[in-house]
Amino acid sequence: MENRKNFFHLHLISDSTGETLISAGRAVSAQFQGSSPVEHIYPLIRNRKQLLAVLEAIDREPGIVLYTVVDQDLAQVLDIRCRELGIPCVNVLEPVMLTFQAYLGSPSRRRVGAQHALDADYFARMEALNFSMDHDDGQFPEDYDQADVVLVGISRTSKTPTSIYLANRGIKTANLPIVVGVELPDSLLRATRPLIVGLLATTDRISQVREHRELGVTYGFDRRDYTDRASIQEELKYARSLCARHGWPIIDVTRRSIEETAAAIVALRPRLR
């Protein structure tokens, strides 16, 4: 038990793809070997309504907040609310921009996504990101044959952050949970276009992550079953059997970073960039 990590919530809020922010958050998190982040990624946050929904999520699962939002009014709303909640909130780009302004003697134009050239690759990544966000956690299953990749796995196997990471590279990715006793949608079983990959982890890893996640108030939810190792073993057994039955490759994410998992997925389908 001496090597058991502590988990914390890391909220990453961006008005663009979030790629810069994700890299910065993971680079810093890697310096703290005794702790591991549970990432919550919110890309394309560009208006007050979107931000308020994010703030509700932060209120439910408090942790460290990092953001790259160039709109000063939105940034102020975020700073004030995080201060009220008593949680750390850092504008990752602001110190860098101030340094540039001081040296160059002129203010920045504060354009959202200014680092991205508006070329075909950029628009492909935006399309993939929108698709992946729309098809998170089993939403719109009728569209699975439009995806490049579909990730399946039990709860807390990094399906969502892996989907977003792949989308940032132009790969349209959907994901859906595997739940014991719940049949997968026919649209997934009929799909011929996407690479379907099962994500698994060890029982201990999943239990630890689940223990550190606040889960809201779903009717009939039993936290003991959710974190119980015997129940998790049954979930993993069921997931493995489904993947074996349909011939889907499996990736163990226990000791992989999101980047490593994404690289393994791309390697399974060479035509993906």
Image (spheres, helix red, strand yellow):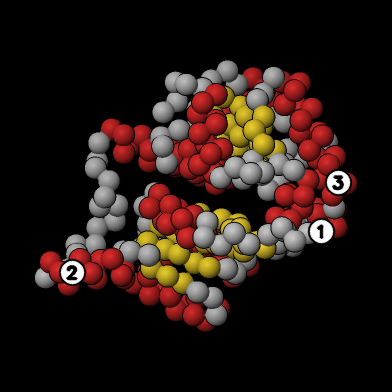
Query: Does any portion of residue 5 appear in the rendered image?
Result: yes
Give percent across and percent down for residue 50.
Answer: 46, 60
Q: Mark 2: give few (<14), some (14-19) or many (20+) Cα within 10 Å.
A: few
Q: Residues within 10 Å of mark 1 (few under 14, many from 20)?
A: few
- Name the secondary structure under disc 1: helix
Q: Amino acid at mark 1?
A: Arg
* Disc 1 versus disc 3: nearer the observer: 3
Q: Give the CA separation, mark 1 to mark 3.
A: 11 Å
The residue at the point 61 percent across, 27 percent down is: 196
Residue contact between numbered discs 2 and 3, judged by CB atoms under 8 Å = no
Q: Residue furthest right?
A: 230
In terms of depth relative to the viewer, which is nearer, 165 or 125?
A: 165
Query: Residue 268 vs residue 138: left or right?
Result: left
Residue found 26% across the figure and 50% down from its top: 115
The residue carrying pointer 3 sits among few (fewer than 14), some (14 to 19) or many (20 or more) residues within 10 Å by Cα, namely: some
Q: CA distance from mark 2 to mark 3?
A: 56 Å
> Residue 139 lies in what quarter of the image?
top right
* Residue 194: % across, % down: 55, 24
- The residue carrying mark 1 is 223
Which residue is more in the foreground, 181 or 272? 272
Closer to the observer: label 2 or label 3? 2
Rendered position, 51 above or below 242: below
Disc ID at residue 231: 3
